[in-house]
Amino acid sequence: MGCAPMGHILYDEVMRYNPKNPYWFNRDRFVLSAGHGCMLQYALLHLAGYDSVQEEDLKNFRQWGSKSPGHPENFETPGVEVTTGPLGQGIANAVGLALAEKHLAARYNKPDIDIVDHYTYVILGDGCQMEGISNEVCSLAGHWGLGKLIAFYDDNHISIDGDTDIAFTEDVDKRFEALGWHVIWVKNGNTGYDDIRAAIKEAKAVKDKPTLIKVTTTIGFGSPNKANSYSVHGSALGAKEVDATRKNLGWPYEPLHVPEDVKKHWSRHIPDGAALEAEWNAKFAEYKKKYKEEAAELTSIITGELPAGWDKALPTYTPESPAEATRNLSQTCLNALAKVLPGFLGGSADLASSNMTIMKMFGDFQKDTPEERNLRFGVREHGMGAISNGIALHSPGMIPYCATFFVFTDYMRAAIRISALSEAGVIYVMTHDSIGLGEDGPTHQPIEHLASFRAMPNILMLRPADGNETAGAYKVAILNRKRPSILALSRQKLPHLPGSCIEGVEKGGYIISDNSSGNKPDVILIGTGSELEIAAKAAEELRKGGKGVRVVSLVSWELFDEQSDAYKESVFPAAVSARVSIEAGSTFGWEKIVGPKGKAIGIDRFGASAPAGRIYKEFGITVEAVIAAAKEVS
Amino acid sequence: MGCAPMGHILYDEVMRYNPKNPYWFNRDRFVLSAGHGCMLQYALLHLAGYDSVQEEDLKNFRQWGSKSPGHPENFETPGVEVTTGPLGQGIANAVGLALAEKHLAARYNKPDIDIVDHYTYVILGDGCQMEGISNEVCSLAGHWGLGKLIAFYDDNHISIDGDTDIAFTEDVDKRFEALGWHVIWVKNGNTGYDDIRAAIKEAKAVKDKPTLIKVTTTIGFGSPNKANSYSVHGSALGAKEVDATRKNLGWPYEPLHVPEDVKKHWSRHIPDGAALEAEWNAKFAEYKKKYKEEAAELTSIITGELPAGWDKALPTYTPESPAEATRNLSQTCLNALAKVLPGFLGGSADLASSNMTIMKMFGDFQKDTPEERNLRFGVREHGMGAISNGIALHSPGMIPYCATFFVFTDYMRAAIRISALSEAGVIYVMTHDSIGLGEDGPTHQPIEHLASFRAMPNILMLRPADGNETAGAYKVAILNRKRPSILALSRQKLPHLPGSCIEGVEKGGYIISDNSSGNKPDVILIGTGSELEIAAKAAEELRKGGKGVRVVSLVSWELFDEQSDAYKESVFPAAVSARVSIEAGSTFGWEKIVGPKGKAIGIDRFGASAPAGRIYKEFGITVEAVIAAAKEVS
């Protein structure tokens, strides 16, 4: 209720959008970072003429099957750009949207035609401000000079636990100035409509800095007894107080009834929006004629249609190719893809030289070089993930990747989960994926991380073993535009294994070698990533002893789960219970693969600081251990 | 190398410690938040006379079995207070250490005896500064007025990817002023020893604010060719450059050789430290005489010995007790424990009224009321977890709890992992633990979280089902001082089940009801938390049909795993393969319990926004589903 004036002015006066096509490319973007106030956004979308939110949806707020869930969800409600609710995510997404606009404008605008030209607006509250992620991304927004990002800070002094004074007494204005933002204070946000209008005008005039408009409001404004109280933060007013509020505000209408004069006032947005899009379409038609190549690229970005034959750019390898760490093989893929995918961009959280994520043909995206494609996130993993979500959701053909050490997915897990939930096809390039990183020790060595992501819905956890599998992992990641991918990559060198292939990765699990026949191996050895080599070596030894041994690469559990029963049976015949898995990570979940008669070799403790080879040996992640286990179970 | 002057002055001139007793209660605490520079700390500990770091350890830096791992680890190296490396954690731990000091000083100091009186020093770098968590905790440190927290900001302008200008151009000084800190700038940190001394003096004089001493240094100072370059950030100088550096600094000695005059200079810390502790011991002896009750409490905090009979304070329930949400039952436990455990304190990340975490007999810990025990973290989950680690590691008897919605463990996972790794017995009170929270929808509904923590080493994931199990979970959590606990608690009301008990929880899994005999049930139904009720109801129905049905509560997988084979067999006889589990979360990992012939009922997709009952029904988390599955498998 306190945000109603800002929301009203934005949707009724300021923003350029077409309600009948919520996906029009050049629309202004709006993000409600304070997602718990989503009823405001649903009401505005309804008034503005979006088909997604009908009167019925407003009545069925937070009910099964309605388009008005408890927090804004882009995958449920067209017109909602991103998924918010977990605090701080929205402002980070907005930074990503604004980055995408600045980048595309720099690449595609021409002296005679500005084909990319929109603002990104966001409303955030005290809760968002307290979250560390918002400081991370606002520091970057200031650094990058995202002048078309305009953030309204709903300064209502109330959070769930009471007055913000109990935990939040910092000087927010000063902090944002320190972060390089332009700051404006609207002292009366409840009724100061003209002040808000003037602030937006001023914000637009400042082109080299993002703007924070601090709008001091009263939470639950209009409610005579509950305004300015934490009891309205997450709870309904109650019937009695709603009545009192209606009287107080002079609003005589039925609940959720939109009076005719209000309807009439808002109805112009349907024709106006159509006109805006038509105007832009005409401009783009002209652009296509004049700038054929750029238009083709931009069309790919707008539609998400990948350029024909793009996957031919991916490298393939033979067992004779020199051994390489998969993080290096990943860099080869990134550089190959950068040449063929116009919307491909990304970077690392200050570990580019370790993650191997630089696209060598491009420079750094910076304030004055926004056309470049290497992003420098600094040591801000959480912000990096959420900014990448914003980039991915800007346009279907924007394909962001972002990188850090695999263990630091812990810093960005909330953003990764929102990638999965909001269908943002971000590619997470996660190197140093096990104890194999060695000396940095247990703080840097992931153990439970593979399991923890295998349990997360709608995400692809991929752990390639060599060059072909790394290429396959990228193929899968690029094709899955509505499902984020995490690539777990090694620091240490790995050989290219006979039998590995891109097509195998696409199935999630496949046989890389087998000396048995009739789908009846004596034992099945299963590995992922850097341990597939160990499984392969153990198989060689066991075969010398006369065993029929199958080696399976289980590079992605999710993809394998989606295969037909017949295919699964062809890889893991039910009759063969002698199974041994090896993975330098938690054995949690492996019981499903190896069964009660099999054995899972892994690590169910924290790591240690020492050279990688020594840790592998001490922890029993060895060829000898696989051979012993195989003999035990078969 | 750039931090050497600060480190030297701290350990040689400023800090009060006893090298022969690294655990002396009243020592000054030092935290190297920039943990990758740990060789400096090992060298200082060695010079100061700590037994933990011998010359051998310095030579075996980052090797198997040495006390000098790649990042500082408190559980490996006495004298190291906390575990750092993942950036930002250290400064957050330091805030927790300083909070503990301020709190204990307020509670236990007397007009005639200051028995708690130490400083907390921390060195942090650009990387820590960029992490959101550090903004969270520094905002709180300013809010709380932690005047005895003194942070050195090693401002070397270099991070791994190069000059910090590529991603970090904010005005750090101004930001810290906005956060309520006192800020001092030492412009020449390489050789300005007196400036550093003066800054520390000034910092100590400012008693109502924490101080940031920005020390501008040159990374790799002394190295003629690699100083001020990112190549020294995480890599060794190399033999040639080490030689050049030695020459440049006029250091003629062998590697790792400590010349006699240096040894002699530092040798005074052993007698000095012993004298400091002896002086304090004498003071505490006097304190014990004068303030018997307070001394007993403080002794419990210092030693970690729990007061006799503390667990009698925990409530128990019968099936006739009124149904309650486990979050409310948790509040009863928290309030009961607050009365008997002197070092018990905690709070929520702005959800106290939802998490039910207020200790009603206490007020809020605030700047001017530091003796109180309810902590108000604001919406800063990550900072909350890491501050709690610092509190827990201040003294063995400090028992912090912290709370948010279970799904938001994603925001604080990096801190939770460090709890587990660094043996900090923090209690994580995580409510709203499933789709049972209802209308807030999928952004707020945990799915994969139970599995993700079951896979994490050295942590206890507990999901109690009712009053007795909640009390049992707290008993386990309090007893496990070197293993953090996560309690997953319901928003919705739950009945008290016949057969539930505290002792059962201590075993992790146990039979709550069984109508079969001879350890041969027809089917075993397994549930956790809110779904144990569903399993119990299904059992009742199945028994009516003549089945022998056992119901097992699997409240903590980790504890159950630690039981004897005989006990496990008594709960899950190998011969009984007809097993059905039900849990409103990912089925990932359940295969281990139900086996290939059993069935795991759970949720392998994201949640939805609707009333809880409706979602349970739509997702098939029902009595009917359990009955159907039981019939299918048995």
Image (tube, coloured by chain):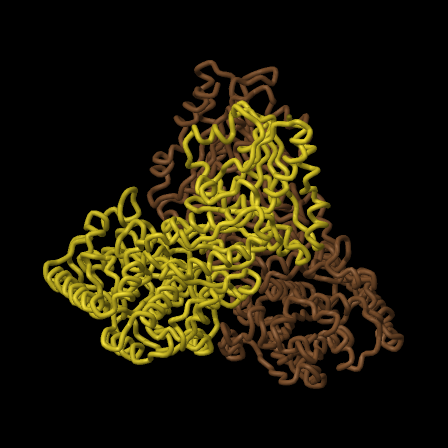
Chain colours: A brown, B yellow
As rendered, which of B632 and A145 lies closer to the eye? Answer: B632
The residue sitting at the front extreme is B320
Figure quadrant of residue B527: top right
Image spot of residue A165 (x, y percent) = 51, 76
As rendered, which of B499 and A191 lies closer to the eye? Answer: B499
In-image side of A182 versus B274 (left or right): right
Q: Residue at x 63, y 55 (%)?
A: B437
Compared with B263, B5 (above or below) is: below
Figure quadrant of residue A264: bottom right
Image spot of residue A270 (x, y percent) = 85, 69
Q: Tell me the quadrant of the picture where the C terminus of chain B can be found.
A: top right
Report whether residue A631 is seen.
yes
Compared with A234, B460 (above or below) is: above
Q: Tell me the quadrant of the picture where the N terminus of chain B can be found.
A: bottom left
As rendered, which of B532 and A106 lies closer to the eye? Answer: B532
Image spot of residue B314 (x, y percent) = 44, 53
As rendered, which of A73 and B392 lies closer to the eye? Answer: B392
Image spot of residue A48 (x, y percent) = 81, 69
Figure quadrant of residue B125: bottom left
Compared with B5, A549 (above or below) is: above
